[in-house]
């Protein structure tokens, strides 16, 4: 599967938010989207999936304009994981995950045994089957985020689109989410597009990155090449220092914000 955006432009009234967005995600690749608050990262996700309409430009799935693809077919390949901000409904985890099968169900259809089996399998893959009877309203942010990812996996998607999946989580849960995305990419060939506030996270799991800034410019390329001190300074108006080090025979990079510019 190849997902592309070509010349994507979007704005509200007279305010241009996204200008000439171009990127390609190949099978099994992870792409991170970086940029300051309010720059349009969530808007970009919605535009690329057709939830908002590009003012100009196009989103392509395997070379086809997504406007020409039937919604049911599209949502069987692309799974959206929104930010975990709690649940207003008293669903149990297993019921929430089973809802992910809606792309495979007809109008007014009820989940079948095969849908329940798919939900159980997804929760097993995520290591959260022990949560199956817990109410979403009683979960921690990390638990709910894992449930939402499991819900997305029930359709066996080709690509996950995740909006700040590691935000508001502690170090341990952040690492669990990051390792989950990386493993799904490398072991199952599931592509991912991830909005994140953390350059270090993007460097840890991403093949490519897209950096947005308030001036309407954007940079797309190899994550370890474009996530550099100059581009971070220009995008966030913060001077940073990127330090590379080795620990237990593995290479890591830390991104330290120093001062405002």
Image (cartoon, rainbow, N blue to C red):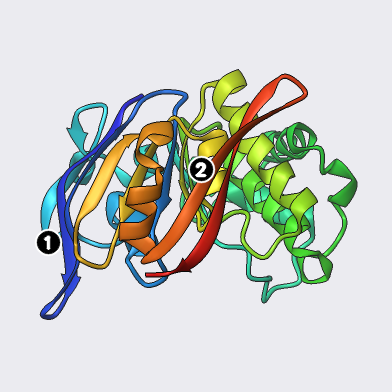
Mark 1 lies on residue: 55
Residue sitting nearer the eye, 260 or 145: 260
Q: Residue at x 86, y 60 (%)?
A: 134
> Alpha carbon of mark 2 to alpha carbon of mark 1: how far?
28 Å
Residue sitting nearer the eye, 36 or 255: 255
Q: Residue at x 70, y 36 (%)?
A: 122
Q: To which quarter of the image does residue 127 belong? A: top right
Q: How many marks?
A: 2
Is 114 situated left or right of 82 in this image? right
Measured along the vertical axis of the image, is residue 237 above or below residue 106? below
Q: Secondary structure at mark 2?
A: helix
Q: x%, y% of residue 203?
A: 52, 38
Is 20 situated left or right of 199 in this image? left
Mark 2 lies on residue: 202
- Label 1: how many residues lie within 10 Å, few (<14), some (14-19) or many (20+)? some
Measured along the vertical axis of the image, is residue 230 above or below residue 257? above
């Amino acid at each position: 599967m190849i997902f592309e955006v070509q010349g994507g432009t979007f704005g509200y009234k007279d305010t241009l938010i996204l200008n000439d967005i171009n990127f390609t995600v190949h099978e099994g690749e992870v792409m991170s989207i970086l940029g300051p608050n309010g720059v349009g990262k969530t808007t970009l996700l919605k535009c690329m999936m057709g939830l908002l309409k590009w003012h100009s430009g196009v989103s392509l799935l395997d070379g086809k304009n997504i406007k020409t693809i039937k919604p049911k077919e599209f949502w069987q390949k692309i799974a959206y994981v929104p930010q975990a901000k709690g649940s207003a409904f008293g669903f149990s985890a297993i019921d929430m995950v089973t809802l992910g099968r809606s792309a495979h169900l007809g109008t007014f259809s009820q989940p079948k045994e095969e849908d329940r089996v798919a939900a159980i399998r997804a929760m097993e893959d995520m290591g959260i089957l022990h949560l199956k009877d817990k109410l979403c309203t009683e979960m921690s942010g990390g638990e709910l985020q894992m449930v939402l990812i499991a819900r997305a996996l029930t359709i066996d998607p080709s690509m996950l689109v995740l909006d700040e999946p590691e935000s508001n989580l502690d170090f341990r849960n952040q690492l669990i989410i990051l390792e989950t995305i990386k493993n799904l990419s490398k072991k199952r060939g599931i592509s991912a597009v991830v909005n994140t506030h953390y350059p270090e996270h993007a460097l840890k799991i991403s093949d490519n990155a897209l950096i947005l800034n308030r001036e309407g410019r954007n940079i797309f390329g190899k994550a370890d090449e474009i996530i550099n001190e100059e581009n971070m300074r220009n995008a966030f108006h913060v001077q940073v220092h990127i330090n590379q080090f080795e620990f237990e025979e593995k290479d890591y990079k830390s991104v330290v914000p120093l001062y405002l510019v």
